[in-house]
Image: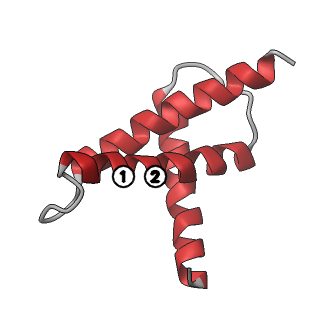
Amino acid sequence: MEISSIFAAIVIGIVIGVLGRLVLPGRQRIGILWTILVGIVAALVGTAIAAALGVADTKGIDWIELLIQIALAAVGVAGVERLKGQR
């Protein structure tokens, strides 16, 4: 894995994580690092799911893949918030 790939994963993780937080109603009480980590995981898992469904590589913007990633990020942010709230 090259350094540019790591930076790209971080940037994509930030974007996906923030979009996942925006989808959820109300205020989420998790930090930006948790948001980035959830976003990175959601981006990777979402890409794998989109590839399994055969919608990962389309002409233009991969809207279905993006929607899958945002939905996973929203679920991840809600899950992290719930886990942090139990402490």
Q: Amino acid at mark 2?
A: Ala
Q: Quick one: which residue is furthest to the right in this view? A: 87
Q: Is residue 23 above or below residue 70?
A: above
In this image, 16 relative to 56: left or right? right
In three-dimensional space, the C-alpha distance between marks 2 and 1, rounded to whole angstroms, equals 9 Å
In this image, 54 relative to 27: left or right? left
Q: Quadrant of the N terminus?
A: bottom right
Q: Quick one: which residue is furthest to the left in this view? A: 59
Q: Is residue 23 above or below residue 37?
A: above
Disc marking residue 43:
2
Disc 2 to disc 1: CB gap under 8 Å: no
Q: Which residue is mark 1?
A: 48
Measured from the top left, where is residue 36 in percent x and y?
63, 51
The scheme the figure's colours follow is secondary structure
Q: Is residue 59 above or below residue 25?
A: below
Measured from the top left, where is residue 65 in percent x and y?
29, 49
Residue at the image position 64 percent from the left and 44 percent from the top = 35
- Could you say which is closer to the camera, residue 53 or residue 61? 53
Residue at the image position 41 percent from the left and 34 percent from the top = 71
Residue at the image position 55 percent from the left and 82 percent from the top = 4
SS at circle 1: helix
Measured from the top left, where is residue 51 in percent x and y?
27, 54
